Image: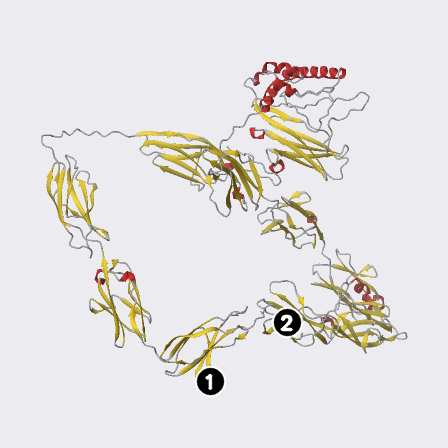
Amino acid sequence: MSINVGFQQFISVYTVSLTLPVEHVPGEEPQMSQISGLFVEKPQTVTAIKGEILNCPQLSAVFIHIILFVTGKNVTFVAKVDSSQMLRKPTMKWLKGKWMDLGSKAGKHLQFKESYDRNTKIYTYELTIVKVVDGDAGGYRCEVTSKDKCDSCTFDISVEDAGEDAGELDFSGLLKKRLTIFLDSMYLRERKQKEEPEIDVDVWEILKNAKPCDYEKIAFQYGITDLRGLLKRLKKMKKVEPKKSDAFLKKLGPAYSVEKGKKIHLNVELSDPNAQVRWLRNGQEIKPSAKYIFESVGGIRKLTINKCTLADDAAYECVVGEEKSFTEVFVQEPPVTITKMLDDIHVVVGEKVEFEVEVSDEGANVKWMKDGVELSRDGKYRFKKDGTKHWLIINEATAEDIGTYYVYTSGGESKAELEVEEKELEVLQSIADLTLKAAEQAVFKCEVSDEKVTGKWFKDGVEVTPSNRIKMTHIGRTHKLVIDDVKPEDAGDYTFVPDGYALSLSAKLNFLGKRENQKPPKIHLDTTGSFVNKNTIIVVAGNKLRFDVDITGEPPPTVCWKKGDTPSSAGHQHMLYFELSEGRVRVETRKNLSYFVIEGAERSDEGLYHITVTNPAGEDKADVMVKIVDVPDPPENVKCTAVGEDSASIQWDPPKFDGGVPVKGYLMERKKKGSSRWTRLNFDIYESTTYEAKKMIEGVLYEMRVFAVNGIGISQPSASSKPFMPIAPTSEPTRLTVEDVTDGTCALKWLPPERIGAGGIDGYIIEYCVEGGEAHGGLCYRADIEGLPVGEKMLFRVTAVNIAGRSPPAVMAQAVTIREIVERPKIRLPRQLRTKYIKRVGEKVNLVIPFQGKPRPVVTWLKDGAPLDTKLVNIRTSDVDTILFIRQAAREHSGQYTLSVQIENMEDKVTLEIQIVDKPGPPIAATVTDVWGFNAALEWKPPKDNGNCEITGYTIQKADLKTKEWFMVLEHNRRPSCTVSDLVMGNEYTFRVFSENICGMSDDAGISKNTAAITKTGLKQKQQPYKEKDMCSSPKFITPLVDRSVIAGYSAAISCAVRGHPKPKIIWMKNKMIIGENPKYLMQNNQGVLTLNIRKPSLFDGGKYTCRAINDLGQDEVECKLEVRGMVKNLHHLQCVTLTMT
C-alpha cells in the first residue's frame, strides 16, 4: 500500500477513507477478496488524496482492516483481525523495513492502541504517527501471530511537500472531480468485464514501454487519477545500473547484525589479489590484534571481530587505493530473561513483604506492576537492586496490598500473589474449672497475647456485672474475675469473650454441698503396649506419642500433668481449649480419660512426667518416664594421622550422644578437594575409630567424613577432615661431591633426587662424623659446614626431607681431610677498566673488580702511590671481589688507582686511571684584529680551565648592535682564530666565543673587547620620519562555521577563524544561550582559529551554535546548525534509524 501525504502549515484538517468495490458472481454471496492467514482482508495499494471526507454507500467496504486517517499532521493505520477461530489472543507487531520493531519506539511520536469487540470477536490495532516527518517515509509491515499461525501485510509511506500554489486549490472540488472520473472509469470497466472475459493486464508494464506523451491517456483508460503518484512510481521502477568498481569484485553488504559476545566476519573480494587494503572503524584505521584478525586468501580479504561489544557498533570501511566499501555493524544485546521467578507470599498485617526476582544481566532494568498498574518509588514501595537480583519491598503490609504483582523485563515476565490476613489472638493461659465450698473465694484468670485487648465476662450467657462481692480486673495481658464469699447460686458456666475476636474461654464453678456421693480419684495406668518396663515409654525422635490414662472419681477430678516441677496443662474442664490447641505438646481430656500427646518427639521431651488428679474427696498421683531415642550425633575430630604413597590413616572420636542406643559402628566416605561427589569406602559397619584408606592417587588432596550407626539409623555426616595428600618420601640425592675445603669448613654440592613425587622437597639433612665415629647433624638448606676439626678425616651424608619423611641417604665414598688449599692470588680486571675510565662531574662511579685466591687475600687500594682516603671513596671487599664506589664524582677523584691482593708472600697488582671531566671555561682575550670590506678577523686565547680534558673546538657567534640578537657563525673551529665574512654594510658587530670539550660547550662565552663596523665611504643615510600604521580594526570572521551532522556518542568539533585588533573577546552560544563553564564543551583560540569541542554529544546537543567576537570597535558573529544522529537497536531485528535533534 503506497500512501502519498503532503504537509503544509496552512492545511488545517484533511481526512482520507478509501474503499474499493468487490467483484462477485451473480447468485452467490459476496466473498472477501484474497482472504488468507489471520487478517480479515489483505491491503491493496491506495493513493491518499488531500480533501474532504467521502462517503460512498454504493461501494462495498472490503478493506476494513487497513484505513488511513490523516488529521492535521497525524497518520493513523488500523488493522483488524478475526479471532473467532483462535484459542488465545493474537500478537500484533508493527515493523519498519525488515527488522525494526516499532513497539520499542512507543512514545509521543509513535502511539499504539488496541481494542476488542466481544460481539464480532474482532481485534482492532491502531498505529498513529504524530507529526509525520521525512524520516517516516519507507516500507512498513504488520505481522499477526497466534500459536502456530502467522500472517503479514506490507505498505509504504512516502512524504512530500504540497506544491507552491496548493493554498489556492479547491481540494474539495478537485477531489470530487477526480472521484467522478474514477467512478465512471470503474463503472465502464465493470460493464466491460461483464461482457468480455477477464484478462490480466499489468498497467505498469504498459507504462514502462509507453512514451511519456501517452501516460495521461493510459492512466485515464485504466482509471488512474493520481498522475503525480504515477510518475513517481515509474521513476522508482526504472533500473539504475550500479557503477562498476575497478578495485572490488564483491563489496561489503549495507549492514550486518551480530549478537553481543559473538564474532562477525566482513568479507570483500578484490580484482587484484596483490592489492593492499586498509580497514577503518569510524574513520580510524584498525590495527591487527587478538580482537581484530585480518585474513587474506587470494583476492578475498576478511576482517574478523571477536567477542563483539557495544563499542563495536560502528561504521566500517575497506579502502583499496582511492576506492572504499562501506558498511555498518549493529551489535544486538540479548533479551534480559528472568532466571528466578517470583514466589507467592502469605503474611500477617503489619509484617514486611519482600518480592525477589533474579534476571540474566546485571545492568538490566525491571518494571514492577500490581494488578496492571505500574508501581512507583514512594513511601509505601521501595525498590532494591544488587547485581542480578531485584527486590520490591513493602514495609508494613495491609489488606489493601492484597493482589497480583508482576515484574517485567525485555525478555520475560513473572507474577506472584500476595495474601495478607489479620493477626490471630493467642491464648497464653486459659481459665480453669473450680470446685469450692461455701464462703470461699473463686478466682478465674486467663492470659492473652495482646495486652491492649479488652473483654467481657459472662455467666450462663448473661454478662457479669461488678459488685462489692464480684470484681473484674485487667492488668497487662491478664484478665481476672474474683468472686468473694461463694454461694450456691454462684455455681455455673463462666465465659470470657475478647472484644473483636471470635474466641471464648469457658470454665465451670462447682459448689460443694454434702459428701455422700463423693468418690476419691483413681489413676489406672495401662503398662502394656508402648511400655518397655514399668512406667517407662520409649519413643523414636520425630514420631508421635499418644498416652491414654483412665481416670475415675466423683465429682470428676481435675487433671494436672507436670514435667519435673512445671505443669504442662490443666484438667478435663479445659477440653475445648486443648482440642483447639495446635501446640506440639498438649493434653486432651475427655470424661474419665486424659490424653497426653507429643507431636514430633524431640530430645528435650525426655524426662519424668507426673500426673495428678484431685477432687474434694482426695488425690491420686502417678509417674511416667518418657525416653526419646534417636540416631547418634555425628563423630567428631576426624583427622588424618599418617599418609603413604597411596594410603592414609584416619582417626576420629565417638559421637557425644549415642541417641540413647549403643553405637554399632561407623561408615566412611572420601572425596577429592573441590569435588562434590563423596565415595563410600565401606558398606559393612566398621567398629573401630581408626581406619586406613587405600587406593588413593598420590599428589591429590582428599577429605574424609564419618557416619555413626546405631539401632535407630545412621547419623548426619561429621565435619570434613582437613585436606590431606597421599605422598611418599623421595629417593636419595644424587652426585654428592665436595665443592671447597678450608680450615674448619667444607662446602658440599649435590643434585636433587631422581624421584621427588607429589610432596616435593622441604629441605635436606646433612650429617657428618669423624671417620669411624657417630654421625650428627640437622635440617638445613645450605651446603657450607663450619666448625669442623682441622686435619681430621670426615664422612658426610645427605638426606632429602618432605612431608612424608626422610629419603635414603646419599653417602660419600671417601673421607674428606679438613685442610685449607692454597691458591695463588689473581686479579681479573674487567675489559672497560684496562683503558682510561672517564666520568663526568656529579656522576656515580661503581667499579666491581673480581679476584681469586685461597685463603682469603688481603686487599689494598692506593691513589697516586698514597693510601686511599676512605672519606672521599668507599671501598667494600668480599671473598671474591672488591668494589670502589663514589656517589658523586668530583675532579679531585681523578688519578691513578692501584689495587693489590696479597696472600703471604704472593701478590698481584693492577693500575687503573680514572679521569673526572667537566665543561671548560670561556676563552679569554677575544679581539677583533682586522676589518676589511665585509670581513672581520677575530683571535682569542684558550680558556684557563679546560675541564680536565682536551679542548676539541670553539663555537663563534655574532650580534648586530642594533638588534643584539646572536647568530651562529662557526661551529667546532679547531684554531684560536677565525675570519667572519658576509657582514652587512652599515652594521656594527660584536662577537662571542664558546669553548668545547667532550662534556659540551662552556656555560659562559668570551666576548670580543672591540667591535667591527662595516661602513661605506661617500654615502650618507637620510633618516625618514617613521609613521606608525594604525592596525586597529573591528572583528571580522574570515572563515565561517559550517553545518555539520555527527553521530551520537562520538566527539565532534566546529571551527571558524576571526581577525581584529585589539584582540576580540569570543563568546560561544547554543540556541542563543551562552555556553558557560560546562565541562562537556572545550573552547580553544589558537591565533584567531576558534574551535568548540563537544565531548560525546547526545541527541539533546543538536541545535544552532553561534560564535560571537566583540572588541571596542564592534562585533561580528557566525552560526551553524549541528545535527546529531543516534543509533537505535531492536531486540529481535536490527535496523538503523536516524534520530535528529536540531
Q: Is residue 686 left or right of residue 973?
A: right
Identify the residue at horizontal 50%, vertical 45% (top origin). Answer: 292
Q: CA distance from mark 1 to mark 2?
A: 39 Å
Residue 938, label in figure:
none
Q: Nearer the viewer, residue 908 or 842?
A: 908
Q: Say which quarter of the image contains residue 892.
A: bottom left
Badge 1 element? loop
Q: Position of residue 906 (x, y in %)?
A: 26, 75
Of pointers 1 and 2, the one earlier in the residue sequence: 2
Residue 244 in the image: above or below residue 714: above
Q: Is residue 438 visible?
A: no
Horizontally, is 1109 left or right of 5 in the view? Answer: left
Residue 45: % across, % down:
66, 25
Residue farthest toward the right in the current orientation of the protein:
516
Q: Which mark is residue 774?
A: 1
Question: On residue 694, which mark appears?
Answer: 2
In screen coordinates, is 347 left or right of 1076? right
The x and y percentages for residue 251 are 53, 35
Q: In the rendered image, which quarter is residue 43 located in?
A: top right
* SS at circle 2: loop
x%, y% of residue 693?
64, 72
Residue kind at label 1, given as amino acid type: Glu
**Tag 2: amino acid:** Lys
Along the viewing direction, whichever of 304 and 819 lies nearer the viewer: 819
